[in-house]
Amino acid sequence: MREADGLYFTPTAQVVLPRYPSGRIVLLGDAGHAPGLGGMGTGLALIAAYVLAGELPEADDHPTAFDTHESRIRPFVDVCQRQAKGADIYLVPTKKSRIWRRNQIMRMLPYMPGKA
Ligand SMILES: Cc1cc2nc3c(=O)[nH]c(=O)nc-3n(C[C@H](O)[C@H](O)[C@H](O)COP(=O)(O)OP(=O)(O)OC[C@H]3O[C@@H](n4cnc5c(N)ncnc54)[C@H](O)[C@@H]3O)c2cc1C
């Protein structure tokens, strides 16, 4: 970063919408329910798309498919978004001691049980 010619910053944010669909459009992935750091954003985006792809051919019309999709996916979104809140203190800490601790934990990960 210190040696880069250009540096781009953008905030990481959580997206919380009261409804994912509007008319013939439904928002998925970060656009609809970005969890923020530590909230499984990619997995959530893929699962939401997969569930919607399953609901569309099953339902009589797209509003029904959108409603079913929302009722199935929102509880999972809530879990991921809850999990993400508070993860930033571990993933992007501001204090030197916490940065050191985070880096040590990251270095240990390849040696921890559960590795595929
Ligand atoms: C630093 C960082 C680390 C992360 N680590 C993880 C991780 O370890 N695990 C995890 O699961 N998730 C992680 N995420 C979150 C994950 O990257 C996102 O949740 C995921 O990429 C969301 O996918 P998406 O398809 O919804 O959006 P995106 O991947 O953002 O895709 C949107 C696409 O739309 C394009 N686009 C935007 N506007 C337009 C337009 N007007 N016309 C055409 N195209 C357009 C963009 O260029 C982009 O390619 C991380 C995110 C960040 C920032």
Image (spheres, rainbow, N blue to C red):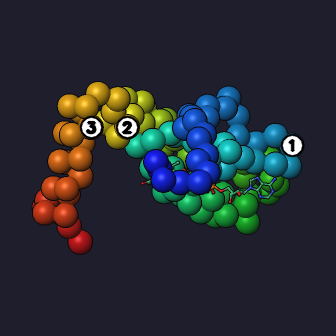
Find out if the beta carbon at label 2 lies less than 8 Å from the nearest ligand 1 atom.
no
* Amino acid type assigned to the residue bearing label 2 in the image: Val
Find out if the beta carbon at label 3 lies less than 8 Å from the nearest ligand 1 atom.
no
Q: Nearer the viewer, residue 94 or 65?
A: 94
Q: Is residue 2 left or right of residue 61?
A: left
Q: Residue at point 19% right, 64% down?
A: 110
The residues bearing labels 1 and 3 have C-alpha atoms spaced at a distance of 45 Å
User: In which quadrant will I find the C terminus?
Assistant: bottom left
Q: Secondary structure at mark 1?
A: loop
Q: Which percent across, then down, holds residue 9? A: 59, 41
Q: Quadrant of ligand 1?
A: bottom right
* Amino acid type assigned to the residue bearing label 1 in the image: Gly
Mark positioned earlier in the residue sequence (2 or 3):
2
User: Which residue is the site of mark 2?
Assistant: 92
User: Which residue is the site of mark 1?
Assistant: 23
Does any portion of residue 50 appear in the rendered image?
A: yes
Q: Nearer the viewer, residue 111 or 34?
A: 111
Q: Residue at point 59% right, 54% down?
A: 5
Mark positioned earlier in the residue sequence (1 or 3):
1
User: Which residue is the site of mark 3?
Assistant: 99
The residues bearing labels 1 and 2 have C-alpha atoms spaced at a distance of 38 Å
